[in-house]
Image (tube, grey):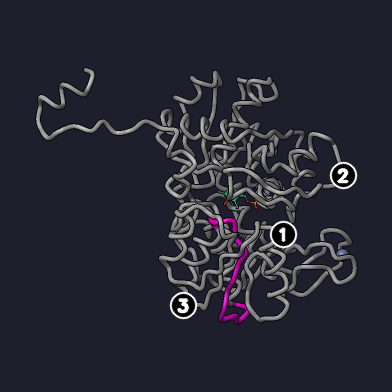
Amino acid sequence: MSYVKGLKCRECGREFPKEALYVCEYCFGPLEVDYDYENIKKKLTRQVIESRPKNLWRYRELLPIDGEPTDGLKSGFTPLIRARNLEKVLGVKELYLKDDSVNHPTLSFKDRVVAVALSKAKEFGFKTVACASTGNLANSVAAQSAVAGLERFIFIPADLESGKVIGTLIYNPTLIAVEGNYDQVNRLCSEVATKYKWAFVNINIRPYYAEGSKTYGYEIAEQLGWRTPKHIIVPCAGGSLITKIWKGLKEFKNLGLINKVDTKIYAAQATGCAPIVTAIKENSEIIKPIKPNTIAKSLAIGNPADGMYAAATVKDSGGTAEDVTDDEIVEAIKLLAVTEGVFTETAGGVTLGVTKKLIEQGKIPKDEAIVVCITGNGLKTQEAVAKKIGRPIKIKPNIASFEEHVKL
Ligand SMILES: *Cc1c(COP(=O)(O)O)cnc(C)c1O
Ligand SMILES: [Zn+2]
């Protein structure tokens, strides 16, 4: 049973069939999946959702596949953690982490979008999948397409962290390291995608792929007891996740699954790559592309595909945006580890660093519910912190050496 009507242009509203299309042939606007919400409303209740297995497919009527899901059957439904120690440090009353650093199978929120993209690519009959990635997408496409038995070509910038490279190569895909930044990789992939009949998950499958991000927002609402927090801080790369969290919450409201959406959305980026945050701060209608220079490589997209929509989301919700330096990112990674036991990657450092800043600036009040989006795992970006943490104390294997070297 499918609840997908087709695709619709985000700009001019023209309708298109549900095929591997992604751009409007009339106005070049991006295409988005259009659902039959009336029939979804008849089917999808809180009870129905709660009765299903704890993975992202529990919301399957709101995901763009026609048949049964085939991929990422264990992805999603990650913990929403009440961060009591962090609350004390930041001086706030109610703070949560939505922790995709433990998503299955590759420890980032990208496991959600890939689950949907591969299920859809198979429905379309593709035998080969591909992607342009800042790292986490590479890991997830490599892993999930290996399981699915698909051919795979993965394109990354050549200077990625070794954890992201090894975490891709272990699945034995064809990995292409391009001497250039992500924006150059992406441009190359757009050319490759027009020439070869492959499912590029974040290019020609993008309208379907991006819908997977909505589940991150659905889960926040469900796990809070079918309500939304007052504040959600979201890391931005291409700007898709932030847009889709907002879309997901509004869908839940329109379907009667939650009573209201009383939430401000905040965009978080690294100072060394903040085109979306800059546009929001300057109240500008256009996103000015920049050349990224930051340790937050997973967010290093200088020309974000959904940048304008991300900025519109923030504005629409009444939130704002902020950026943090590389030093602030490292400090935030360490703070999260020692308070909550969560080792996040640089993107999580960006989100928490920005949250801290917004609280200090008084832009997020201290007595309202806050959700911080932790989207990736710190074991993949170890070089970012390796020289900024303690060292082990080296001793001889005897008690005298132990007592000599360790202050008790
Ligand atoms: C890709 C990514 C994001 C942001 O995703 P967009 O939808 O491109 O904005 C955030 N965090 C991590 C860890 C990512 O890998
Ligand atoms: Zn159009």
Residue 37 tag number: 1
Q: Earlier in the sequence, mark 1 or mark 3?
A: 1
Q: Nearer the viewer, residue 182 or 313?
A: 182
**Quarter placement of the C terminus:** top left
Does any atom of ligand 2 lie closer than 8 Å to the CB of label 1? no
Taking the image as shown, residue 90 lies to the left or right of residue 301, namely left
User: How much space separates mark 2 and mark 1, taking CA atoms?
Assistant: 31 Å
What is the x, y in percent for residue 216?
Answer: 58, 49
Residue named by callout 2: 285
Taking the image as shown, residue 381 lies to the left or right of residue 259, namely left
* Residue 208 seen in the current view: yes
Does any atom of ligand 1 lie closer than 8 Å to the CB of label 3? no
User: How much space separates mark 2 and mark 3, taking CA atoms?
Assistant: 43 Å
Query: Is residue 130 one of those drawn in magenta?
Result: yes
335 in relation to 109, above or below = above
What is the x, y in percent for residue 266?
Answer: 69, 36
Q: Nearer the viewer, residue 269 or 26?
A: 269
Q: Amino acid at mark 1?
A: Tyr
Q: What residue span does the magenta drawing correspond to?
A: 123-136
Residue beneath the point at 75% across and 44% down: 275
372 in relation to 161, above or below = above
Residue named by callout 3: 149
Residue beneath the point at 87% across and 44% down: 285
Cβ–Cβ below 8 Å for labels 2 and 3? no
Q: Amino acid at mark 3?
A: Gly
Q: Nearer the viewer, residue 262 or 30?
A: 30
Does any atom of ligand 2 lie closer than 8 Å to the CB of label 2? no
What is the x, y in percent for residue 178?
Answer: 61, 65
Taking the image as shown, residue 293 lies to the left or right of residue 48, namely right
Taking the image as shown, residue 313 lies to the left or right of residue 149, namely right
